[in-house]
Image: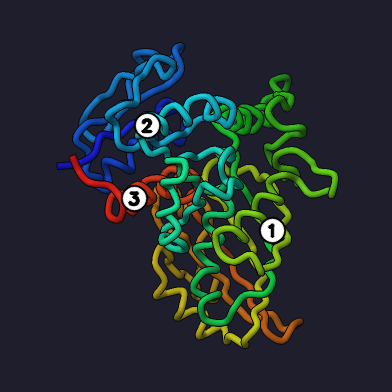
Amino acid sequence: MGYKVVVVGATGNVGREMLNILAEREFPVDEIAALASRRSLGTECSFGDKTLKCQDLDTFDFKGWDIALFAIGSDATKTYAPKAAAAGCVVIDNSSLYRYDPDVPLIVPEVNADAITGYSKKNIIANPNCSTAQMVVALKPLHDRARIKRVVVSTYQSVSGTGKEAMDELWNQTKGVFVPGQEVAPSVYPKQIAFNVIPHIDVFLDSGDTKEEWKMVTETKKILDPKIKVTATCVRVPVFVGHSESINIETEDFLDWEEATEILREAPGILVVDKREPGGYITPIECVGEYATYISRIRQDSTIDNGLNLWCVSDNLRKGAALNAVQIAEVLGQRCLKKG
């Protein structure tokens, strides 16, 4: 016996990954439905060795379904998530719409799985921002040991975080650099992304921070500990898939880098690759398609009494979105729902 599962936004990058990961992890599915907007009606999506045809989200009846994984924007989620939740289907939402709602748990299973019981207030669970998800997986075991006071993070985020059009823009601009007369002007991003970096993700706030930076601060506090101080600089880089982060950590208690390395090696969801030699670290291209959050370059920060630096890499379409959503569904099934 299993669950009746709906994937909403099944034709997008994250929706397709959700279907892939549900199949890969052999999530107990009795029945599955792929939903998208009316213009994608009948579009085929893969689920393991099966082919699903997309149904119309606008006319779908969520009654009798157990779990809905949402991978659509906040505007559409605002319309359809409450309908699904009211019909008794638990929504696991990948948009930012519900992340800051005090009645909606924001979950990274390796970090705060116990908070999932709060889903019953609205029948909705929020999936965090991609850059936050991988960072808190790395911070959690260190926080448990030495209590983190402050985090300074700089991100190197791939274009897949923006969507397929952004990936196409990087590809076309890259080709255009080498073919005279075929240069491609920016349309998704405010400046050229090929062979460039853009220190701007999401909208600017009055503080001078971008909303992506604000998300990392706010979500880390909600998921991990409201007392942690976080400052972020988020940068878009010409990488197709895989987010990287340079993380500086200040702790209350001294933590030697060697002990930190061992703690991280034992932590769930983490793989440490740190050989202190050329190539002895993980780069984004190596994490694509993987479940793990990879940690490299673990070392002491000698400028403060209790400081560590590390390099953190993860597949943003997986741990940053689809994988985390499926892991939430697994915890939900194990702790809260009855099969069949």
Tell me if 163 is positioned left or right of 195 in this view: left
Residue at left offset 56%, top offset 32%? 163
On residue 332, the disc is 3
Asked if one can make out residue 198 in the rendered structure from this viewpoint, the answer is no
The kind of secondary structure element at disc 3 is: helix
Asked if one can make out residue 185 in the rendered structure from this viewpoint, the answer is yes
> Quarter of the image holding residue 76?
top right
* Foreground label between 2 and 3: 3
Residue at left offset 33%, top offset 36%? 19
Q: Name the residue under label 2.
A: 7
Counting residues from the start of the chain, the first of labels 1 and 2 encountered is: 2
On residue 154, the disc is 1
The kind of secondary structure element at disc 2 is: strand
Q: Position of residue 265 (x, y in %)?
A: 42, 74
**Colour style of the rendered protein structure:** rainbow
> Quarter of the image holding residue 185?
top right
Mark 1 and mark 2: span between their CA atoms? Answer: 32 Å
Residue at left offset 47%, top offset 63%? 111
Q: In which quarter of the image is the N terminus?
A: top left
Amino acid type, residue under disc 2 in the picture: Val
